[in-house]
Amino acid sequence: MEAVFEWDGQYSVDCPLLDEQHEELIQLAAELHRRYDAQERGTLAEAFGYMNAYTKYHLRLEEVVMERVDYPQLTEHVEEHRRFEEAIGLLQARFEAGDESAADAAAGLLSDWLLKHIREVDRHLVDYLKQSYPAEELKALMERSYSEVSLYTH
Ligand SMILES: [Fe+2]
Ligand SMILES: [Fe+2]
């Protein structure tokens, strides 16, 4: 199946901050895929590196939120994140060893994994948050967590 590189409202988890980051991730994967297709060789490493940095940033944000609320499914959710990061790490290593197609494989993997993960895992987290906190409190919680993670230090 061809990877989907276009954001669509159906992927929304109805949480603006997470939706925004998920959409950004799909766009970063799309850009990496585009550069690979266009054979923009010298620019692949930068796009791959930034996609990975943003991925870590996003996953950490969710993990901070889950820790703050003592999310009952924290362990399973974090494990899913780690398994994915390991798979991307292997592709990164292949890329660094000179296999440029590994960058394109990583773009496809991110998009495939993310859309499935949003549907099956992130959505449960948001449902839990909404059931546990009134909207205003949830907004404040997301903002506090957001201020704790940054794109370049993990
Ligand atoms: Fe997510
Ligand atoms: Fe997640």
Image: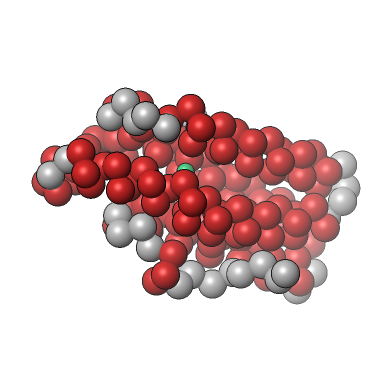
Identified at 64% across, 36% down, the residue is 83
Considering only vertical position in the picture, is 37 above or below 130? below
Q: Position of residue 81 (x, y in %)?
A: 55, 38
Q: Nearer the viewer, residue 33 or 40?
A: 33
**Count of numbered marks:** 0
Q: Residue at x 36, y 43 (%)?
A: 125
Task: Name which residue lies at 53% across and 64% down.
Answer: 27
Query: Considering only vertical position in the picture, is 22 above or below 6?
Result: above
Q: Residue 147: x, y in percent?
A: 29, 36
From the viewer's perspective, tell me whether residue 49 is left or right of residue 53. Answer: right
Q: Quadrant for residue 35, please give it.
A: bottom right
Residue 4 picture quarter: bottom right
Q: Position of residue 68 (x, y in %)?
A: 29, 27
Quadrant occupied by the N terminus: bottom right
Q: Is residue 36 visible?
A: yes
Q: Is residue 131 left or right of residue 82?
A: left
